Image (tube, helix red, strand yellow):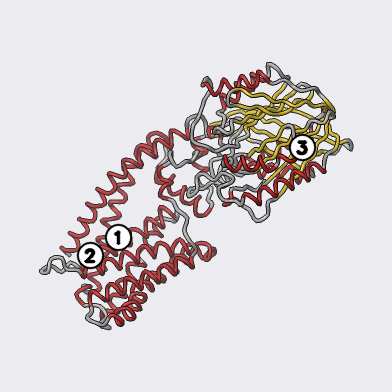
């Protein structure tokens, strides 16, 4: 739904990757030990060694134990079937809340005004805040039922009160820290209700603009964002569907058959965008389409990034099944094949075009490397294809999407656009010859989305004309390439001595998520390993060369996509709400805290 980037969607700055549950547990024990030592040093007149040992152990028993029990209980209550996978999220909330509880004990023990004992209201207010944090985590971030969240959020603060009662009876805590237990629970409930009322007030205020503009609630969108990030939920597709629109786009297919009439390779180029991120919309399309046709046709398939931006994100991930069937039909239905090919290459300004023609039909791809090479918007893609049709009987256009530099964008009519037009105008097919094709794929075992590699991994196709000239296309199922890494890989393959060689990516957004909104190839992988695998795959494709013929087709299909400007409009609305919320939310929350403190004093 959204073309996520750090500059556009401000809420992504709040997202970060949690460590493992084992590491969080260690953090909880260490922090509780430290807090225990600090609390003991403030309240007891003991030796330094006793303060360190006994204070630290008391901190673990007093702060860590209720936190661990709360984490285990809520994980079992909400995610019993995925306990090991989900426990770190509940454990992290417990860690934060244990820190708040410990700090309230410490600060409450520091009597800034000797005549006023503020420890009771501070400690109870801290536990009301703990309730609120648990509710926000369970309902907003983890997307659980709000009434279950209301009940489960009480576990940790009630455990804290229970442990306070137990330890005060053993003389570890001063009796003055906690009022009579029933009174403490009543005050806790009253303060928690005050905070929840402030929460619902904030929700009401921030939801109003989005409800008016889109008929959706921002809170619902935010909870679904977190749900996708944490569990891969596809709930966001419901909202994408409500905002989307039906349209038509072009899919292009090139099929190569060998002398045995067996399909050697398939090139597919749908004019859609493989986004927005994770497993939503079209993000997983490239890997699915390539693997489907590989399996069905016993061949090697390469899926290119068409001339489309995030306006053409499919709203449903299930569209991949229909699209896969359409490409499968196109591949099987090819009838008119040509055994001759000519290479295409031209440059205008920063734009370089590269491809091939067969029987008057052209496959043309573009890059602006070393300048930023990102999406080509739909209107520009249509105009450029029409330009190509002035010189060829049919044309498939692809974006190499192979140089990630910055966020600069261009549109139809801009100086950049006319460089693309001029490059097409300069395309003159080389002498048409019989040709050979060799293909290979490499699963890049051990690498995955966190490394910037999608399920389609690496695919290479080599063309060799009868006159000896050659072209190689190497495509990674990735979301763009780090410029220096691109340069490095190009330098590593010079020994193959191709007349034309270029790196491509599918622009899959499956490698992107809310905590890592940009994940271009080369940021996290071992450069030398990728270089080795690329050279090996190219060598395999060269060994696979055999005479072929090419079938070429384009057709229009219907698909539901986000639509022009919808992503930017929604991002702008969320950012405006986020900016306003940063002012309104603290003010309302401060009033709620004051109200809660007043209630506790009066009760």
Q: Residues within 10 Å of mark 2 (few under 14, many from 20)?
A: many
Taking the image as drawn, is residue 496 in sight?
Answer: yes
User: Where is residue 433 shown, x and y percent of the image?
Assistant: 83, 26
- Which label belongs to residue 129? 1
| Secondary structure at numbered mark 3 | strand
User: In the image, what residue occupies the spot 65% across and 50% down?
Assistant: 528
Which quadrant is home to the C terminus?
A: bottom left
Which residue lies under the disc numbered 3? 462
Say above or below: 105 vs 129: below
Along the line of sight, the residue nearer the viewer: 556 or 354? 354
The secondary element bearing badge 1 is classed as helix
Q: Is residue 316 visible?
A: no
Q: Is residue 373 left or right of residue 57?
A: right
- Point out which mark residue 509 bears: none
Dividing the picture into quadrants, the one containing residue 574 is: top left
Residue nearer the viewer, 589 or 340? 340
Real-space CA distance between mark 1 and mark 2, rounded to the nearest whole angstrom: 10 Å
Characterize the local packing of mark 1: few (<14), some (14-19) or many (20 or more) Cα atoms within 10 angstroms: many
Q: Earlier in the sequence, mark 3 or mark 2?
A: 2
Q: Residue drawn at (62%, 47%), measured in percent from left and top?
A: 454
- Distance between the Cα atoms at labels 1 and 3? 63 Å
Camera-side residue of 302 and 429 = 429
Q: Position of residue 88 (x, y in %)?
A: 47, 63
Residue 253 vs 158, above or below: the answer is: above
Depth check, mark 3 against mark 2: the one in front is: 3
Find numbered disc 2 in the image and state the secondary structure of the residue it sits on.
helix
Give the labeled residue for mark 2: 122
């Amino acid at each position: 739904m959204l073309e996520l980037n750090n500059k556009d969607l401000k809420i992504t700055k709040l997202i970060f990757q949690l460590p493992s549950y084992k590491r969080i547990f260690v953090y909880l024990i260490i922090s509780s030990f430290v807090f225990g030592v600090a609390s003991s040093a403030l309240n007891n007149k003991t030796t330094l060694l006793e303060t360190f040992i006994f204070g630290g152990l008391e901190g673990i028993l007093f702060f860590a134990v209720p936190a661990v029990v709360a984490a285990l209980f809520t994980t079992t209550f909400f995610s019993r079937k995925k306990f090991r996978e989900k426990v770190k999220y509940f454990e992290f909330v417990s860690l934060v809340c244990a820190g708040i509880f410990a700090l309230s004990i410490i600060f409450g023990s520091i009597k800034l005004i000797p005549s006023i004992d503020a420890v009771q209201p501070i400690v109870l207010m801290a536990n009301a805040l703990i309730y609120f944090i648990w509710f926000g985590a369970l309902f907003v971030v983890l997307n659980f039922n709000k009434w279950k969240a209301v009940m489960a959020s009480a576990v940790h603060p009630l455990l804290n009160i229970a442990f306070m009662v137990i330890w005060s009876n053993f003389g570890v805590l001063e009796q003055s820290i906690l009022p009579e237990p029933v009174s403490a629970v009543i005050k806790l409930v009253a303060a928690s209700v005050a905070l929840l009322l402030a929460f619902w007030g904030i929700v009401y205020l921030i939801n109003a603009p989005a409800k008016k503009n889109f008929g959706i609630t921002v809170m619902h969108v935010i909870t679904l964002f977190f749900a996708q990030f944490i569990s891969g939920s596809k709930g966001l597709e419901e909202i994408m569907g409500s905002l989307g629109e039906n349209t038509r786009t072009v899919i292009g297919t090139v099929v190569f058959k060998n002398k045995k009439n067996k399909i050697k390779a398939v090139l597919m180029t749908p004019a859609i965008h493989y986004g927005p991120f994770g497993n939503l919309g079209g993000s997983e399309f490239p890997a699915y389409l390539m693997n489907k046709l590989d399996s069905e046709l016993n061949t090697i398939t390469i899926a290119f990034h068409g001339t489309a931006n995030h306006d053409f994100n499919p709203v449903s991930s299930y569209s991949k099944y229909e699209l896969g069937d359409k490409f499968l039909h196109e591949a099987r239905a090819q009838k008119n094949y040509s055994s001759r090919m000519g290479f295409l290459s031209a440059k205008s300004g920063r734009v370089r075009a590269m491809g091939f023609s067969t029987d008057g039909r052209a496959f043309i791809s573009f890059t602006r490397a070393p300048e930023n090479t990102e999406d080509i918007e739909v209107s520009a893609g249509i105009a450029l294809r029409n330009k190509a049709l002035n010189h060829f009987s049919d044309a498939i256009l692809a974006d190499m999407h192979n140089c990630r530099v910055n966020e600069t964008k261009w549109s139809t009519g801009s100086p950049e656009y006319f460089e693309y037009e001029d490059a097409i105008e300069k395309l003159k097919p080389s002498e048409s010859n019989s040709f050979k094709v060799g293909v290979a794929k490499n699963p890049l075992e051990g690498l995955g989305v966190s490394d910037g590699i999608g399920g389609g991994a690496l695919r290479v196709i080599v063309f060799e004309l009868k006159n000896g000239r050659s072209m190689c296309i190497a495509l990674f199922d990735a979301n763009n390439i780090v410029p220096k890494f691109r340069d490095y890989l190009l330098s590593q393959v010079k020994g193959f001595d191709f007349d034309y060689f270029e790196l491509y990516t599918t622009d899959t957004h499956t490698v992107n998520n809310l905590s890592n909104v940009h994940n271009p190839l080369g940021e996290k992988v071992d450069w030398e390993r990728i270089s080795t695998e690329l050279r090996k795959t190219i060598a395999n494709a060269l060994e696979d060369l055999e005479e072929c013929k090419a079938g070429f087709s384009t057709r229009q299909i219907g698909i539901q996509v986000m639509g022009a400007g919808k992503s930017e409009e929604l991002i702008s609305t969320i950012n405006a709400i986020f900016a306003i919320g940063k002012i309104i939310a603290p003010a309302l929350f401060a009033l709620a805290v004051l109200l809660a403190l007043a209630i506790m004093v009066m009760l």
